[in-house]
Image (cartoon, rainbow, N blue to C red):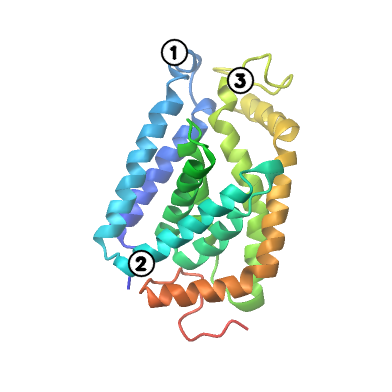
Amino acid sequence: MLRFRPPAAAVLAITTVVGLGSFLWPFVADHDFSVAHGQQAPWLFAVVLGLLTLVVLAEATSIGLDAKTIAVLGVLASVGAGLRVLSAGTAGLEPVFVLLVLGGRVLGRSMGFLLGALALLAGAFLTAGIGPWLPFQMLTAGWVAMGAAMLPRASGRAELALLTAYGLVAGLVYGAVMNLWFWPFLSPETAPVGAGFVPGAPVADNLANYGRFYLATSLGWDLPRGIVTAVAVAIAGRPVLTTLRRAVRRAAFDLSPGAPEPGQTEA
């Protein structure tokens, strides 16, 4: 049985901390740093995040991934890539988030994170979506899947309701986080009035500016993503969870903390 062991947890925690820094640096950097190094920050963090993702994969491999386990992860990542091809963010409609929520719930934190990152990576190759934004998409999608695994233990209708609500929230939060990778680099002419990044400004001022930016430019895309994810999870969640859990047990995974134990019914 594959367990979420301390080494994997530590590497994943480091990846998360570095990732948060890559998104949140505009709110803590002083004016001189923002002016002198701001344009370099996304590339620097993207390289580091890519390396840390490989470290997470290597760590997971070292604690017992066999061929069946890798096959399950690969198949799910391929399905996610295919879903990206069907709708690569058009009008905020991204069915891949259904897979991230349900797959992450079943696979657990570390494997869920890898599922999210690999699904977005594979999807980028299929949709010609490779660019400086890709490492940030991989990280944020990994968080979405990992977050589903970290939800409280539940089963049956209670679990489905929990995942439905999470799908709605995750669709909104994904967009709110992703905007931060480019928002500091918008020119005053590009950003809405009163919604641009001001280097060296107090944290509260830039947070308010970003809030206005999000409401003006992103909410209309993120809300459909959240609604579609929530509706799809509510409709298809139960059979998909059952199928994924059956496949995971055969591949000798450990279930995530919130999942029913083998043999437990999903009433």
Horizontal arrangement in the rendering, residue 57 relative to residue 207 (left or right): left
| CB-based contact (under 8 Å), mark 3 and mark 1 | no
Give the CA distance from mark 2 to mark 1. Answer: 46 Å
Q: Give the SS element for disc 3.
A: loop
Which residue is disc 2 drawn over?
69
Which callout, 3 or 1, points at the residue further toward the start of the chain?
1
Task: Give how far across and how far down residue 241 sits, in percent.
Answer: 56, 72
69, 35: nearer the viewer: 69
Mark 3 or 1, closer to the camera: 3
> Hey, which quadrant is residue 205 in on the image?
top right
Which callout, 2 or 1, points at the residue further toward the start of the chain?
1
Task: Quadrant for the N terminus, please.
Answer: bottom left
> Hey, which quadrant is residue 154 in on the image?
bottom right
Q: Is residue 32 above or below residue 151?
A: above
Horizontal arrangement in the rendering, residue 187 relative to residue 255 (left or right): right
Which residue is disc 1 drawn over?
36
Task: Give how far across and how far down residue 83 sits, in percent.
Answer: 58, 53
| Badge 3 amino acid | Leu
Which residue is disc 3 drawn over?
186
Q: Which mark is residue 191?
A: none
